Amino acid sequence: MDKMQLVSATKKLKHYVMEMDHIYEHARETGEEKDFYTVIKPFVDEVHFVLEEWGELAKKFIVTSHPKHLYIQQIDATIENMKEISVQAFFPKTSYSRFKHRLHSIHYILEKLHSEINENEFPQNF
């Protein structure tokens, strides 16, 4: 069950990354800031909820499967970066290069984890 949960949470986070990119591009184009309590906070809370589950499962996967070139520190950095850009995406004055760099970094780790899950042979409950 853990493998399926990790795959599901990883896919959700990939979707959130695409959504944050879209939100950010729209905010930059329009210069419009959304209301914090009705738009930003519910979105951020939703992302944080999935991140918490994903973080635990991803770390468990790394400890048990020992994938090459994927470490717990990268999972922690990805969680922190996602928490930050989930808020920053709504603000048009957010640094473009910093936002995109973090977005690409997150995307890389999610893709790397997803490919490692598919390549490794391990039981459903790792």
Image (cartoon, grey):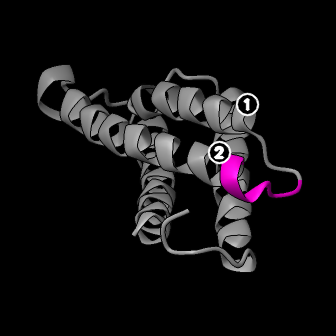
Q: Residue at x 72, y 43 (%)?
A: 105
Of 63 and 95, which appears nearest the observer? 63
Against 66, residue 49 (above or below) is above
For residue 40, what is the image quadrant?
top left
* Closer mark to the observer between disc 1 and disc 2: 1
- Tell me: 76 left or right of 19: right
| Residue at the left extreme of this rendering | 38
- Inspect this view and state whether residue 33 appears: yes
Q: Residues within 10 Å of mark 1 (few under 14, many from 20)?
A: few
Q: Please say whether residue 99 is visible from this viewpoint.
A: no
Q: Residue at x 65, y 69 (%)?
A: 117
Question: Against 95, is 112 above or below?
Answer: below
What amino acid is at disc 1? Answer: Gln
Residue denoted by label 1: 73
Three-letter code for the amino acid on which mark 2 is drawn: Ile
Residue farthest toward the right in the current orientation of the protein:
68
> Label 2: how many residues lie within 10 Å, few (<14), some (14-19) or many (20+)?
many
Q: Position of residue 31 (x, y in %)?
A: 40, 30
Tell me the magenta residue range.
Answer: 63-68
Foreground pick, 62 / 125: 125
Q: Within the magenta stretch, is there residue 116?
A: no
Q: Quadrant of the N terminus?
A: bottom left
Between 85 and 68, the one nearer to me in the picture: 68
* Label 1 vs 2, first from the N-terminus: 1
Question: Per the image, is 66 magenta?
Answer: yes
Q: CA distance from mark 1 to mark 2?
A: 13 Å
Q: Is residue 49 above or below residue 38?
A: below
Which one is nearer the viewer's eye here, 34 or 32? 34
Q: Is residue 17 left or right of residue 122?
A: left
| Residue to which mark 2 is pinned | 106
